[in-house]
Image: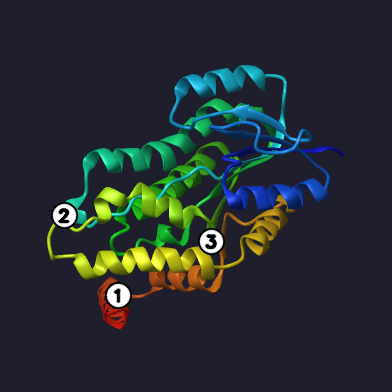
Amino acid sequence: MDKSILIIGLNSELAQNTIRELKMNGWDIYATSRQVGMMDDKIREFNLDVTSELDFIRLKEKLKEVKFDVILNFAGIAIASAVDELDEIELKKQFDINVFGLLRIIKYLDSNLKENGRLINISSMAEYGIFPFLSPYCMSKASADILLNTFSIETGRKVVSIRPGVIATKFWEASIELNDRALKVKNEKYKEEKDFLINNANKNSLHGASPIATGKKIAQIVELKNPKPVYNIGLDAKFAKLSRFLPQKLINCLVRFILKTRVQRKK
């Protein structure tokens, strides 16, 4: 039986590695991005900016006769900032893509899923909310997971949140560029921490988990007929999950100690 999937955000390296795996497994692949023409002609590509209601209306019209087994969302950005320096406009941008983008997928495209179809969202270990200077990103991932899970409770729709740890992709380089203004030192208060964040992001782009192996794992989850609601990929993501079972005061002290130790080590 033919298997069909709609992938949102194919410009992601992780998406492209997942697509390669799914192609080998015989999936009929539809994909969206803000820039079409990124993949081969065996993949049906469509233009979509997840912040644009008009783009969703146009896509809905083009896909009105199509039903999918899976819709898989990779679209997302990461805004970084100290809380007391956080720009409200930047926070709104974060939520417009990571949360409202997912909401628009649900509102406009859920009817394109087959009766037993699944909606899968690529979340992050940031969902556990224990990463300083990344509160916008953490909040957006946690909010998206709540939105996804509540949607499942209300409708019975099968949903999956995939929460990877650090993956070695250009996502980190893009995040440094995206957060250039926020990471510039306005005063001495967070200078060392911001320097550390930039160095750590560069390190993550080289030494994180393999995007090929992670893409293969995501493809395996897509193939499952009855997947679990949540998958944590990578040891770092599994350790982050443990924060849910420990006292908040202990977690906060531990995170502050680790951050201080790593910042001092970079001096």
Locate residue 40, reporting x and y percent.
75, 37
Locate residue 100, reporting x and y percent.
41, 35
Q: Quadrant of residue 26?
A: top right
In the rendered image, is residue 68 in sight?
Answer: yes
The numbered mark, 1 or 3, whose residue comes first in the sequence reads 3
The numbered mark, 1 or 2, whose residue comes first in the sequence reads 2
The answer to which of 210 and 218 lies nearer the viewer is: 210
The answer to which of 193 and 136 lies nearer the viewer is: 193
- SS at mark 1 in the image: helix
Which residue is labeled 1 in the image? 259
- The residue lying at 15 percent from left, 56 percent from top is 186
Which residue is labeled 2 in the image? 84
- Whether residues under marks 1 and 3 lie with C-beta atoms below 8 angstroms apart, the answer is no
> Horizontal placement of 184 versus 114: left or right?
left
Residue at the extreme right of the image, as rendered: 1
* Residue type, numbered disc 1: Leu
* Residue type, numbered disc 3: Pro
**With respect to residue 79, does 198 lie above or below?**
below
Locate residue 253, reporting x and y percent.
25, 77
Image quadrant containing the C terminus: bottom left
The label on residue 164 is: 3
